[in-house]
Amino acid sequence: MLSIINPATAAPMAEIAVDNATAVQRKAAVARAAQPTWAALPLTERISLIHQFRQLLQQQQSRLAAILTAETGKPIAQAEAEIGATLERIDFFTAQVAAVITPTIAHQDCSSVPGSARLEEVITHEPLGVVANISAWNYPYFVGANVFIPALLTGNAVLYKPSEFASLTGQAIADLFHTAGVPPDIFVPVMGGGAIGAALLEQPLDGVFFTGSYATGKKIAAAAAAQLAKMQLELGGKDPAYVCNDVTDVPATAAALADGAFYNNGQSCCAVERIYVHAEIYDAFLTAFLAAVQAFKMGDPTDPDTYLGPLSRQPHLEALEGQVKDAIAQGATLQTGGHRVEGTGWYFAPTVLTEVTAEMAVMRAETFGPVIGIQKVTSDEAAIALMNDTDYGLTAAVYSRDRQRAQAILSQVKSGTAYWNCCDRVSPRLPWSGRGHSGLGTTLSLEGIRTFTQSRGWHLKAPSS
């Protein structure tokens, strides 16, 4: 059994049954046997079933958000927002999938010579087969839907392993799919922790899609490579933002970056984790940034006005304390926060550090919590060098009144996504990918639908008359 702990109260709230290696093997075999029938369904029927899932998701949004908040500590308003925005992603996938997987005529021999054979070259886009979706706890609807919706639409069977820290949400997602009419042997939940994930990777798979840490991603990549399965890995980030000296509305920029750093308690894949500010506006920016952070309400995540809830995982409190202590020991200044919040639950005060340097863990290692370092720079060139001083490369942001200047800076920064005067946002219309330790492969966009398919080339020659 897996015990589910409410991070806001540190009290047990549920226990769920977990799979064992034998059950995982059986589920994989069932999915393999059922997948061809699912792929043979007309696309319109698969779309219809996904629409039914979307309708249930919308109808039960409040109930599902409450589950998500209870087991992860995500503030209820943010949980509601995640589910609401997932509906839009489903709309994108269902609207675009036909264009992506429709066969393409690459060439036709239109010779009019009597008696000659006509040659046609066609590309089809076929499902991978059986894919493993090892999902994340921080955005189980967003991150999951980026995989299981296009995977199902393109004709794959999905072995879905939700994070053990979002198991109740994962089970709820599976129940909704089955209620919507997606067969239980096509969307198959696999429940448990790391050992069950390892057992899943021992099964014959055609694709492995994982969101999580770089360290775990390396192990998953090795397992997937051993059987030459297609893989997509969304891993960590140490996402930088640079505020140029031509910014005039400093308070608005500071507020935007405070939200980018602390939304979902900083537990976002693309959260801002490093901020570089030009010296000419540094003091004004810091004053405005601290005011924005100190205005955030921390408390009961079921309160609609709460902005900062507890951390989702208790052990991470120690990791955050370690980064803060390391920074202070090396000369950083603690502007606010830096400690656990007394009382029940796994709360960590929103923390701002200044006089930070690239040698400190808080500016190098993934933080994934409500802690941010702000560093003063004197030029765009210095900012670019610091932004690139990382093994990660998920997103990067530049705030400037000059689009040309911002794009020139961002073009020199290693990242899969670039932001001008915005941050910490994801669009279903744009590809989501990383550089370096932030992963490989793509989700979202048309490319992210096609990643769940494999191409076949057809040489079709009509007989001579």
Image: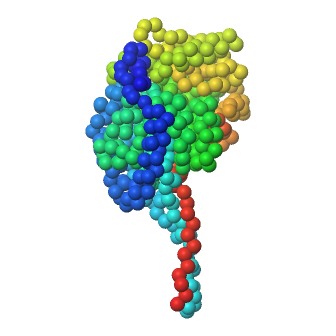
Q: Nearer the viewer, residue 13 or 310?
A: 13
Residue 216 against residue 188 in the figure, above or below: above
Residue 160 against residue 130 in the figure, above or below: above
Left or right, 144 with respect to 360, comes to left
Question: How is the rendered protein coloured?
Answer: rainbow
Find residue 270 and report its image quarter.
Answer: top right
Residue 143 against residue 67 in the figure, above or below: below
Relative image position of residue 421 (x, y in whole percent): 54, 36
Which residue in the rendered view is the most extreme toward the bottom? 114
Relative image position of residue 69 (x, y in whole percent): 38, 25
| Residue 44 seen from this side | yes
Q: Nearer the viewer, residue 341 or 319?
A: 319
Find residue 371 and report its image quarter.
Answer: top right
| Residue 305 seen from this side | no
| Residue at image coords 46%, 7% | 342
Relative image position of residue 5 (x, y in whole percent): 41, 19
| Residue at image coords 33%, 40% | 176
Relative image position of residue 144 (x, y in whole percent): 45, 39
Q: Nearer the viewer, residue 465 or 257?
A: 465
Which residue in the rendered view is the most extreme toward the top? 342
| Residue at image coords 70%, 26% | 378
| Residue at image coords 27%, 39% | 59
